[in-house]
Amino acid sequence: MNKRKNRHKNTYIHKLQEWQDKQYLPGYYLGGNIPPQVSQPGNPKLLGWFWIVQGVFGLLLTIVFFSVFYEDIFQSIRYFIVIFGVFLFFSCVCLLQIIGGIHYLKKAYRKEKLNRITRKIIIIILLCFFIVVFIIILNNTLFVKTIKTTVDIDNIGIYSDGLLIRNEIMTLKLRCSAEEKDLIRGKIFRGESGSITIYYYYGMLTPNKGILIEIE
């Protein structure tokens, strides 16, 4: 038993010395070489739970990010590649963190207990996912606010799905029908000045995006 412990200790010291000598060597730890503090952590249970919590939290933030910008994904192929690419990249990173955390927990728990923990982690991830989806649905149904405002025609722009309303605080995106967009486009092209009154509503979580109701 002591021989095995001493052998493990000597291996760790050898890998630690290797890491100290080659940590700044480009590409050395990008292949099969793994730093000893990652491959042989002193407390795999703590590191495993840290990775899992970080992965779940990051996955939820990624879903929220996608829910905020999903309307812009269909504006052009460039938007689709950028937004979907960012979503896919961070989702994969977070999932890898969760898988890595479960791998560390294998060193700290027995197989039966680890299976129960894995099932609970999957349930928590699914539950958090459905909570985020539920909040997004509420944001587009119940948590909405109707606004009446007066806008100068000079501060109105056109984009693929609607209108851009510029003010001192932010640029507001309003989806509207083709007829309403053509009406505003005509005013802009004719060089009309003045202001118009619009009614629109938006979700409380996304105040920079809304849907046009009426133009006066």
Image (cartoon, rainbow, N blue to C red):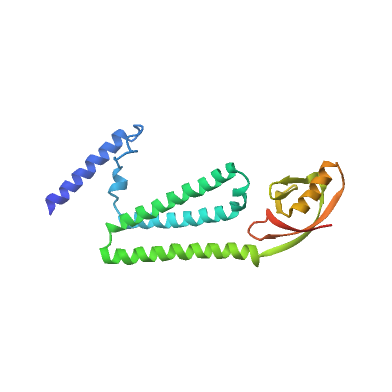
Q: How many marks?
A: 0
Residue 209 locus on image (x, y percent): 67, 54
Q: Residue at x 31, y 42 (%)?
A: 35
Image location (x, y in percent) of residue 30? 34, 38
Q: Position of residue 142 (x, y in %)?
A: 65, 67
- The quarter of the picture where residue 104 lies is bottom left
User: What is the quadrant of the N terminus in the image?
Assistant: bottom left
Residue sitting at the far top: 25
- In the image, residue 145 sits, relative to residue 97, either above or below, namely below
Q: Which of the two residues, 22 or 180, is positioned nearer the viewer here?
A: 180
Q: Can you give x and y, in whole percent of width and height, for residue 207 in the image?
A: 67, 56
| In the displayed structure image, the side of residue 36 where residue 181 appears, left or right | right
Q: Which residue is pictured at 64% across the width and 56% down the height?
A: 206
Q: Which of these two is toward me, 158 or 182?
A: 182
On the picture, is 156 further left or further right than 59?
right
Q: Is residue 3 left or right of residue 184?
A: left
Residue at point 43%, 54% (across, down): 55
Asked which quadrant contains residue 49, the reply is bottom left
In the picture as drawn, the residue positioned furthest to the front comes out as: 179
Q: Quadrant of the C terminus?
A: bottom right
At x 58% / y 62%, what residue is drawn?
A: 136
